[in-house]
Amino acid sequence: MTRPITLFTGQWADLPLEEVAALASGWGYDGLEIACWGDHLDPWRWDDDQYVADKLALLARYNLKVYAISNHLKGQAVCDDPIDQRHWEILSDTVWGDGDPEGVRRRAAEEMKNTARLAAKLGVDTVIGFTGSSIWKYVAMFPPVSQDAIDAGYQDFADRWNPILDVFDEVGVRFAHEVHPSEIAYDYWTTKRTLEAIGHRKAFCLNWDPSHFMWQQLDPVDFILEFADRIIHVDCKDVKLRLGNGRNGVLGSHLAWADLNRGWDFVSTGRGDVPWEASFRALNSIGYDGPISVEWEDAGMDRLLGAPEALAFVKRNAFAAPVAAFDSAFKAQ
Amino acid sequence: MTRPITLFTGQWADLPLEEVAALASGWGYDGLEIACWGDHLDPWRWDDDQYVADKLALLARYNLKVYAISNHLKGQAVCDDPIDQRHWEILSDTVWGDGDPEGVRRRAAEEMKNTARLAAKLGVDTVIGFTGSSIWKYVAMFPPVSQDAIDAGYQDFADRWNPILDVFDEVGVRFAHEVHPSEIAYDYWTTKRTLEAIGHRKAFCLNWDPSHFMWQQLDPVDFILEFADRIIHVDCKDVKLRLGNGRNGVLGSHLAWADLNRGWDFVSTGRGDVPWEASFRALNSIGYDGPISVEWEDAGMDRLLGAPEALAFVKRNAFAAPVAAFDSAFKAQ
Amino acid sequence: MTRPITLFTGQWADLPLEEVAALASGWGYDGLEIACWGDHLDPWRWDDDQYVADKLALLARYNLKVYAISNHLKGQAVCDDPIDQRHWEILSDTVWGDGDPEGVRRRAAEEMKNTARLAAKLGVDTVIGFTGSSIWKYVAMFPPVSQDAIDAGYQDFADRWNPILDVFDEVGVRFAHEVHPSEIAYDYWTTKRTLEAIGHRKAFCLNWDPSHFMWQQLDPVDFILEFADRIIHVDCKDVKLRLGNGRNGVLGSHLAWADLNRGWDFVSTGRGDVPWEASFRALNSIGYDGPISVEWEDAGMDRLLGAPEALAFVKRNAFAAPVAAFDSAFKAQ
Amino acid sequence: MTRPITLFTGQWADLPLEEVAALASGWGYDGLEIACWGDHLDPWRWDDDQYVADKLALLARYNLKVYAISNHLKGQAVCDDPIDQRHWEILSDTVWGDGDPEGVRRRAAEEMKNTARLAAKLGVDTVIGFTGSSIWKYVAMFPPVSQDAIDAGYQDFADRWNPILDVFDEVGVRFAHEVHPSEIAYDYWTTKRTLEAIGHRKAFCLNWDPSHFMWQQLDPVDFILEFADRIIHVDCKDVKLRLGNGRNGVLGSHLAWADLNRGWDFVSTGRGDVPWEASFRALNSIGYDGPISVEWEDAGMDRLLGAPEALAFVKRNAFAAPVAAFDSAFKAQ
Amino acid sequence: MTRPITLFTGQWADLPLEEVAALASGWGYDGLEIACWGDHLDPWRWDDDQYVADKLALLARYNLKVYAISNHLKGQAVCDDPIDQRHWEILSDTVWGDGDPEGVRRRAAEEMKNTARLAAKLGVDTVIGFTGSSIWKYVAMFPPVSQDAIDAGYQDFADRWNPILDVFDEVGVRFAHEVHPSEIAYDYWTTKRTLEAIGHRKAFCLNWDPSHFMWQQLDPVDFILEFADRIIHVDCKDVKLRLGNGRNGVLGSHLAWADLNRGWDFVSTGRGDVPWEASFRALNSIGYDGPISVEWEDAGMDRLLGAPEALAFVKRNAFAAPVAAFDSAFKAQ
Amino acid sequence: MTRPITLFTGQWADLPLEEVAALASGWGYDGLEIACWGDHLDPWRWDDDQYVADKLALLARYNLKVYAISNHLKGQAVCDDPIDQRHWEILSDTVWGDGDPEGVRRRAAEEMKNTARLAAKLGVDTVIGFTGSSIWKYVAMFPPVSQDAIDAGYQDFADRWNPILDVFDEVGVRFAHEVHPSEIAYDYWTTKRTLEAIGHRKAFCLNWDPSHFMWQQLDPVDFILEFADRIIHVDCKDVKLRLGNGRNGVLGSHLAWADLNRGWDFVSTGRGDVPWEASFRALNSIGYDGPISVEWEDAGMDRLLGAPEALAFVKRNAFAAPVAAFDSAFKAQ
């Protein structure tokens, strides 16, 4: 089981894909998890065969593979309520259009279908992304939220995503939701409930990214073991906690990244509190053989320093399981 | 310093005020922190002298005092965005009106002014409540939120509350904001920022309620010491954590109260994780001599059992500081 | 849901049952969980109607009820291997016989069948006990133990207990296994495996006793929630940890009870580390309405002191869940 | 083993002994641990038989016993260097004299001899106190302290205390040193070294007072087990830690008692972090049958409130060990 | 003090010794701790001078030394009760014979004597191994175990090992018992008791292997300091804990190695929870100058990857103590 | 922000400065923090231009810079009381003179003024050092210390240091006090009080050295953020805790360095418990751009091993902050 190590291009989309490919290849990455923003990939061009061929040729030039593509930003808009300035900043004009919330949601859903189609054209069977959520804003449970309102939120998610997943099924691609605050599934119990909402249909899977698990006090290893049959992609983003002084809180205090008064912050892979080695052993134990993708997000460290360091870190810790048992050597009979 | 112990009537507003007064008096409470909902208090009748006189007479019949009144539910609507079904359920028709969000906010602000006026009429100098917040929904910081958007949220709060606080100043009453998720100030650093936003004006103070501090990993004792000059009221609501198993998360998973898969839940005062005795010692050290108010919220215990138990608990732990130092007895000279 | 509180007579079997009944009744217990040793109950006399009537009359004289009977000591011998001096000391001559291990096991199994029959005669639907285990002795996994050997142990358990459980089914009684070291199921994962081994048949249930959970670092609350459909009885035995000094180990060091160099020791209910209140809330949440039975085992405290204290402790903490939600009082509409 | 519970009069010496006796007797204490300051006891009058008889008569009037007397303040001066203003404030003129340090030390030593003699006259075999230390001031180990300087400190202690202990031996009384910062023995390893310095002579024993153990991270239970043969008296003073916020330090920051920015503070017995029940069980296990003495020192609670509460607390937790083992009831043979 | 770093061959005995020697030499190991199983060493050939010479020649060819030899598997059988299938799998026909338990024990004892003789012939003064135990199976202390039964277990150990140790004394070799579950000494207090049982005779020493200390909550550094005079060999096997989720227990749940539901598992040296650097500093402080032997046991990592990595890890952390003190540079005089 | 990494020469002053320079240069250090003892620097020669020129030439030969000079040992004597043997050992004859305490203090103060003058001559704007303290010896607060005595200690500090700081102001150099036991400011609250005592004058700043923070349970990151405007130098000395076994205490037990029974000990940078990476990020966040100076103090590791290892460690972790935010790559607009 020699799994490829890829670089997620989402935080590099200010650079042309070619430049990112050159860097990643130079550092020794095996491939890219390509984001559907910047000039990296445009899902609306899924049926432009030349466009697809050019992208694959670009990768081939740098000896890189693609195993999964990502479209977090548009997936976010599928269920979100409200739709506001924050979405405007990250959505293309095609999706934003006149900014009418329901229209934005529908166009975002359309782009997610196209993302599945593009993945298929690229020979890729996994699309990673977010779902958005109409009830995330009720997370504090005050003003009092009725059980009906919560139930309706899960139903809204199912209603909006089932048609998208139908297209995924048609083209033989699966969606890997990243469990994350702001989304319909952001922790252990909401993931359970989300899978129920969608009838555990096969097209809806999970991207394991532990960076939001630690401050929520969730165990990323346990998550792998419990959702073994759903984890089809792995993103390595790390997080460092600065809690315990009684002043920094788990909610981040609306403070900016890199502010050390935040209770936690993202850091380059290997420099945080995620139990990476145990997690990779858990991935071995469930037989995960897909890519391990490095997602660099560290507001306190330069990405040109972090990306190659993270690659070395992952290589050192994501080793394969052995074939033979150690106590077989004790056998006399 | 013998501080009165009061019962907050907010969670008893399904009963007539007279019935709550009878119960509280029977258990031995010194007074009530009266909520402005149910039939307990109606701020719009602030200038109805008979109404006010009747309320005071009712209290007198049961040998109870009032030191503060509360209007969390309407304060919430002053800044909130969105305004939705949740608000409709807790707002009177007077405030909800046609449900147009900006209209709701303005009428809620009007009620908060009236609450100040009613307090003055009742001979009370403290109104407790929430502020609402237009940026609470951005707590997860994704989709990316610009610093401008955050700054605008604090400004919106200041713009909406300054006129309300002007009325407070006029009638010689102070507003005690309860630091709480869903509000503009919900932890240590947001409280700092909120006080800055409003220029540290004297009319804006704090109600110390530690129930949301523990799961955020905030130290309620430190909070008392740091904001000593702002704490003018104390609400005793307790919370029990059920974290650490790697499955229950700090965000509560959109689960209902009393579900043991929540990472935390409110419990009757004295049965949770709040360091009450140390907190009362801290209140002593800052010279706090206002009421200690018991706020019963425990979805797993009957309120008729919890309320008298909490009173006994508070009496046992909220003792006054002594006059003499213990080592003065060592003196030979 | 007003659950009865009973006293387990197992640690009082050096006294005649009548004397124990007099004590328990005097302290205010609602009933007894009667042990099948000493003169308390003899399963071999299950079909002696007078014997049964006399026992029930004795209880009635002291205004006590019986909801469950216990036979840990004989259950232990059903699967154990080796059978040795330790068993001889706790087994009656009837079961021990000539001491041939397989004969002892068979006679113990016979007594367990009779215990079910006796329960039925007493009008009781629950028998509490241990299973014994042929593989407990392999717990250290050295010398190396093959997976086959482990599997065989679970199969041996199923083979020996299925015929016993057939009798339980016949007479409408269920067996409540106490999860405990020395037994086939002693922790979370072994309980899962044990239930699988026996095909999850309905007659095999669980007695929740958390005293061996704490030093194993198991969460007794989680256990209640996960095995909600199997928990039919509750024993309250408490345990105090003395770990962390780097010398006292979790295995107890073959030291005697009350030796403070042990890493843990049993203590009277309410004086240890079991999270009792959270556990009782969990029992509420699964709708458990059976008896709460106090099991006194404290080598450092007199039982005449501990038993009434434990009763008071349980009463204070095992309160029922309330009917109404606290936030219903916020409703304006 | 029914051990007497006594009240230490040291922190009550601003009151006449008779008044303290009246209070203690009224609360239900069995006796007093009488301090040699205030008007409580004057060691220089040891050979005044009338004085001694009057003191005993006073106790008898209040139905109180005396098992031990204390002279911490003068013991402190025996080895201390420097001798300064702090000593002047707590020493009588007799001992202070002209204030010449060596003279003060010699007169303090003389008073300690007299304290032994007075104890004998009172029929008491235990004197509790401090030793002082010439090397305590080097605790920070900077400027660099040579091993020779440390060794000389222990030798100085031995040289000054051996002649005192000779008098203790003569009159059949033992000295119980209280392990405490400022003294020659203040933690586990310094107690070991101190006992070596004095050749483990029988007259030098220990008073177990855990109040300075917790913030030093010492285990008071382990201390009882390890120094079982030396512990001849028990003082119950409690301590509460306020550490972990990264600002409050273990050294107390030269802040006054009751300042909540101290990392720790003394509190009334039962309200702090000392593991009292486990400690009393340890005292049972070493066969300690001397007095349990309550030492009230709580700068945040009135002593008239604390003293009776502490008595009740100790009674509830310092129970005797039982005679029979719980598993003897399992015996069939 | 430049201590050799050796590789323990026990988990490589499926390979010919020559192959293991080639690998170890290639990685830079200084020597081997050779196991007495596989083709590595056969104690019954101790008086075959050519056999011994060949083994030494083999080592010399690879520039390796031998400082200690190991015979855990046969030592285990000396006291064990029961003797069963597990022993059959790891014992040679010579020792197993007809499988009669007492015969197996006696022949195992004979092999241990021969192991001492072989060590002497090889010029080695240390034999590492296990003792077995007749009372390990009583570790759960239920069914109740009498103190007599425990005492008899220690006596059985002494009776069986004293004659073996006589041979060790004769040939000038010492036995280093590895403290380990399944053995007579498996933690701190049982090690104390074991040394007493054997009268602290010089031939019985200890092999420090911390891999079973961590999950028992024992401090390996403290163990080195307390048993300084007995530690004559060091095995580096690491362990990783996966406790705290309330489901994984310290007893391992009869689960296989590498199953992440186990509460703990062995991992390659440097990847677990053992405080290696502090342990090596402790070994420095007791003047230990014997070999540091790497014992690879990691069911989740290939041994060809782990063995050289562990060597580098040990080299980086097992540095020698310096000669001069750092503060001598401050001296002006 | 590429900050220089320097080596503090204080623990190398037994070697000639030239030899230290050769070593440091060879390992790759950017400069030296030169100590004013040994032959490294003599403040009394501040106006000897040739002396100063020679020192600078020496540094230039080895391509090293000097950004700060240190005089801890003489600063210590400015306020200390008592002045004793410990000072004699570390003070030059010039300062010690006849050893009269007040004379020593005055001459030490004079040397500190000269140190400022020497710094200025060397082109350096920072002098690092200790202040000494007349009240450190009262840290245990027993015998009782009056608030007046504490206040007098801070005043004594101000009285003695203000004239020294006047000279610092004259020559444009600042003093960086190292927060440390034995000094006037040794933790968070004493640093606050110290800055108040001296009126927050600009010449009095701080040298951040976290080695004494960890065992006092102080947060070095919080310290950086809170005293951001005062931190003008950074010393990297690491510390390892050995607490938690209930025997090792936080006060060190008057035991020698490298004794593993101490509760803590200094170790080479990167091998202890200081959160270095978070600390360097905090230094970035306050815009600190001065030197990072490695202070080697490890009684268990050779300095020739530790110094280059520490340099590599610091380089790996003290990276600069990036320019761009990671989420700017998400922007579509």
Image (tube, coloured by chain):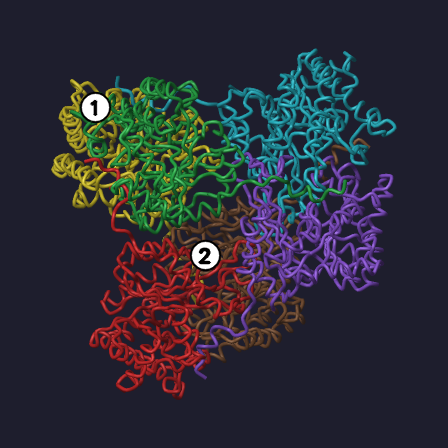
Chain colours: A red, B brown, C yellow, D cyan, E green, F purple
> Label 2 is placed on what type of residue?
Asp
Give me the disc on residue A306.
none
Which of the pair E275/C323 is nearer the observer? Answer: E275
Q: Measured along the vertical axis of the image, is residue D28 above or below residue B90? A: above
Q: Measured along the vertical axis of the image, is residue F319 above or below residue F163? A: below
> Label 1 is placed on what type of residue?
Pro
Which of the pair C35/E253 is nearer the observer? Answer: E253
Q: Position of residue D235 (x, y in %)?
A: 61, 28
Residue C3, located in which quarter of the rendered image?
top left
Residue position for label 1: E101
Q: Position of residue F323 (x, y in %)?
A: 55, 73
Q: Measured along the vertical axis of the image, is residue F65 above or below residue C219? A: below
> Is residue E322 in view?
yes
Q: Chain of mark 2?
A: A
Q: Position of residue B184 (x, y in %)?
A: 54, 68
Residue position for label 2: A273
Image point (60%, 74%), residue name: B158
Residue E142, located in which quarter of the rendered image?
top left
Q: Residues within 10 Å of mark 2 (few under 14, many from 20)?
A: some
Image point (33%, 17%), residue name: E163
